[in-house]
Image (cartoon, grey):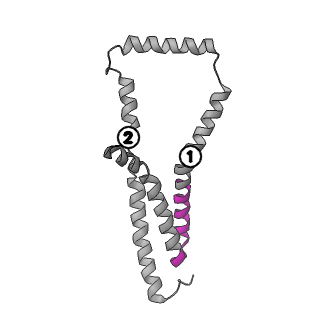
Amino acid sequence: MNASHIAYKAAEWLNPFVHAMGLVVCLWAYRFSRKPAYFVIGFYYLLAVGSLLFGPMINRAITERSQTQTRLSAEVEQQYQEEIRAVHEKYYSRPGDSTVSTVAKAHDMEIGFPVGPLILLSGIWMLAKEDYKKFHVTKGPPVA
């Protein structure tokens, strides 16, 4: 494994990490200020973490189940593969000239950087820090 592969794999976990940190900050802030807005935003982060961590497993299970239910016969599968091969030879005869494979390779290496969740997390952190300071000045949670 080279360094770029390790960095790519680490970047894949950046999005769930940012959402998990958002959930922790919201729970921490809710503990001191008891403002329902922290609870609501924490629920958003909880849903995001759940979908990022469990979504791929659920999609894989659904795909496997649908593929086992819609199996093609051996003859139809062979005809399909021959047609795919003929189209590939007709339009992508030169190696390296395949637009489809280039797009697929570029798509596989795409790294999504969570700018929006990072901005939201930093805003919540700043608000929570202020509420934390108010909590320690008054020595108790605010009275509603």
Q: Residue 118, image x and y in percent?
A: 40, 58
- Queried whether the magenta region covers residue 131, the answer comes back as no
Residue 102 percent location from the top left of the image: 35, 28
- The residue where tag 2 is placed is 110
Q: Is residue 45 magenta?
A: yes
Q: In the figure, residue 89 lies in which quadrant? A: top left
Secondary structure under the numbered disc 2 in the rendered image = loop
81, above or below 59, in the image: above
Nearest the viewer among 91 and 3 is 3
Q: CA distance from mark 1 to mark 2?
A: 18 Å
Which residue occupies 38% across, 14% down? 91
In the displayed structure, would residue 33 be above or below residue 64?
Answer: below
Q: Considering only order in the chain, which callout, 2 or 1, is on the residue closer to the N terminus?
A: 1
Where residue 6 sits in the image (x, y, percent)? 37, 47
**Callout 1 secondary element:** helix
Outermost residue, right direction?
69
Amino acid type, callout 2:
Glu
Residue at screen point 45% across, 57% down: 17
* Quadrant (top left, top right, bottom left, bottom right) of the N terminus: top left
Given the image, on which type of amino acid does mark 1 rest?
Gly
- Identify residue for label 1: 55
Give the percent coordinates (x, y) of residue 139.
Answer: 49, 89
Q: Which residues are magenta?
A: 31-48
Position of the C terminus, as image quadrant, is: bottom right
The crowd level at tag 1 (other Cα within 10 Å; few <14, some 14-19, many 20+) is few
**Majority secondary structure of the magenta segment?**
helix
10 Å crowding of disc 2: few (<14), some (14-19), many (20+)? few
